[in-house]
Amino acid sequence: MAGILGPRAIFWAFIVLATGMIYRTYLHTFISLTLGIGREIQPIEDFPWTCTRVRHPLLEGCEDLWLDEQDRKLYAACSSLESRKGWSPAGSLYNISARSRTDHIAVINVDQPGSDGLYGLRQLKVGGYQDDLDLHGFDVRKIEGRLRFWLINHRPPVDHVTGEFLDARVVGANSTVEIFDLDETSDTLEHVKTVASEAILTPNGVAVEEDGLGFVITNDHNTKTGTFRDLELLSGGGSLAYCRSDTGKCHIAADKGFSMANGIAHDKNGYYYVTNSASGLITVHKLVNNELIQVESINTGYPMDNLWLDADGNLIAAAFPDSIALVKSSMDPYNIVAPATVLMINDIAKQLKTYGKNVKVSKLAEDRDAKSLPSTTVAVHDAKGHKLFLAGIFSPFITICEQRL
Ligand SMILES: *[C@@H]1O[C@H](CO)[C@@H](O)[C@H](O)[C@H]1NC(C)=O
Ligand SMILES: *[C@@H]1O[C@H](CO)[C@@H](O)[C@H](O)[C@H]1NC(C)=O
């Protein structure tokens, strides 16, 4: 046979084979994942939740949420939709002058809707930090009665000699992690320190270890900018950086097998759970010799964003059942809401031990007709209060759901 095929034919045979393989491994996954071929999207009425939208300028563009289950408060990292549409480095949007410079942490009292239905909504003040914040994912730990916040901050890049902005389309954002403390009685976040590192490249999510020192960030891409950056949706990309809050040092602790590493959660047994938006996988990692080795990989079949580990050990993922609607919603967020799915893996630690990657993934909520949930990038389950909180980076409102018992 070999004698019949000239070099040209072998070349073409190779191309056909290669594209076929690329189709099978990447495009096929990507297309069926984003279009949701064969995916049944259920209406919100199929689920036992009564949901209310809470709309306010302080609750716009909230990419991430954190629930203080004991003190019954919900914290949200919010912006303005104008800002999100111009300055979202994760989505390759680099218009520095579009920033509204209003990014903030909003707080509500989750059990007290009040007569205005705004749940005591307020914005935390910021102390000891002069610049603007450009928020994305965040995590919080309770340490000696205070709350300590780790906030991803997509600073615009600045020329350190002239003080002028650099062209962010060329150099990308100067992303850092900002550590702040919040005293129980105070409404002011006091700046503790900035963690800046080359390993904090394109941060998206952050998860802090039990001791409040170690933390891991997801990098959603391999590069800050560049022609091929968006192709990482198909080819895969992303990494995990492990940092220490005390020394401020970080290193890349895993950089293989990611496909837009996005949301991250950490449990008491030392496992990290990471969503891969472009492959529908939740990868499970453990820190061994300063590397975050992958110990399991769970296929959910959905593009996903942030993760939340609730008080009962259930892992909750905000998922996108209809990516095209999501893109439309991001372009016209005041008028278009995308359907949302909230996935749940019950007692993930126990299920992983028993079933490995074949854990059972179920739906905690879904909103086919976009009636009550936002275009959701984060869902937080309040196991104790039987509530669900949802927000979105391109949503003008958040949603609070109460379980019908
Ligand atoms: C950047 O944002 C500013 C302010 O919103 C706007 O006037 C300008 O047209 C935008 N530039 C680009 C290139 O989109
Ligand atoms: C990035 O931020 C760090 C921390 O503030 C600062 O030291 C550094 O000069 C900044 N770099 C650029 C390019 O903006």
Image (cartoon, rainbow, N blue to C red):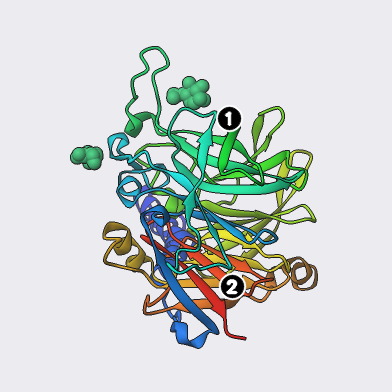
Q: Residue 327: tell me if it is visible.
A: yes
Q: Nearer the viewer, residue 58 or 205?
A: 58
Residue 263 lies in quadrant: bottom right
Residue that appears at 53% across and 64% down: 280
Q: Which residue is mark 2?
A: 387
Residue 127 lies in quadrant: top right
- Taking the image as shown, residue 334 lies to the left or right of residue 320, namely left
User: Residue 71 location, x and y as percent?
Assistant: 67, 58
Residue that appears at 49% across and 38% down: 153
State the separation of the CA atoms marked 2 and 1: 34 Å
Q: Which residue is mark 1?
A: 194
User: Does the residue at mark 2 contact the one at mark 1 (Cβ under 8 Å)?
Assistant: no
Dot 1 surroundings within 10 Å: few (below 14), some, or many (20 or more)?
Answer: some
**Identity, as a three-letter code, of the amino acid under mark 1:** Thr
- Lower sequence index among marks 2 and 1: 1
- Taking the image as shown, residue 144 lies to the left or right of residue 18, namely right
Above-or-below relation of 73 to 213? below
Label 1 near ligand 2 (CB < 8 Å): yes
Label 2 near ligand 1 (CB < 8 Å): no
